[in-house]
Image (tube, rainbow, N blue to C red):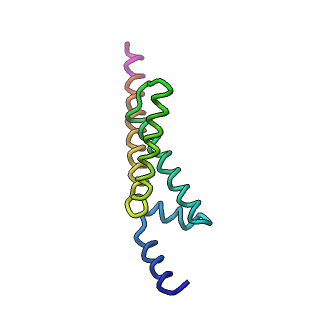
Amino acid sequence: MSASVVGDEAIVADRMSGIARFIYEVMPNFDIAGYVLLALIFLMSAIVYKLGFAKKLPLLKNIVIYIFLFIGCLVLTFLAFFLPIVEGLIVAALILIIYRVRRMNEHKKEDSVA
């Protein structure tokens, strides 16, 4: 490789978001790193969807929803190289987990009082 290509890779690596950079530094192959980033984004998106927005639906409708969620995650994966998409999904999941735990605790208190 020429020196300019290595320099361009360093510039790109410096501009990457934190978790995306970490994944690309740890993984042995760039192709595998891309798939890991996609899987992480899909997993976090599915958790956020399930915690905050999911309703009881028939199996076929759930499959359709997750297919479209996966298609959306393909777009988010391209954005995740330079924007903190994974970090934002982690924060959203933590907020929804805290909300769910507090709601369950309040529900338990109401049941014990009644």
Residue 14 x/y as whole percent: 43, 73
Q: Residue furthest right?
A: 28
Q: Main secondary structure of the magenta part?
A: helix
Residue 44 x/y as whole percent: 47, 46
When the figure is inspected, residue 62 is found, relative to residue 76, above or below; the finding is above
| Image side of residue 68 versus residue 24, left or right | left
Residue sitting at 42 percent across and 58 percent down?
Answer: 78
In the image shown, does 50 or 78 lie closer to the viewer?
78
Residue sitting at 51 percent across and 56 percent down?
Answer: 37
Quarter-wise, where is residue 79 in the image? Answer: bottom left
Q: Tell me which segment is drawn in magenta.
A: 108-114
| Image side of residue 9 versus residue 27, left or right | left
* Residue 109 lies in the magenta-colored region: yes
Residue 35 x/y as whole percent: 55, 55
Q: Residue furthest top?
A: 114
Name the quarter where the N terminus is drawn.
bottom right
In the image shown, does 94 or 28 lie closer to the viewer?
28
Residue 80 x/y as whole percent: 42, 58
Q: How many marks?
A: 0
When the figure is inspected, residue 63 is found, relative to residue 25, above or below; the finding is above
Name the quarter where the C terminus is drawn.
top left
| Image side of residue 29 versus residue 107, left or right | right
Residue sitting at 48 percent across and 65 percent down?
Answer: 21
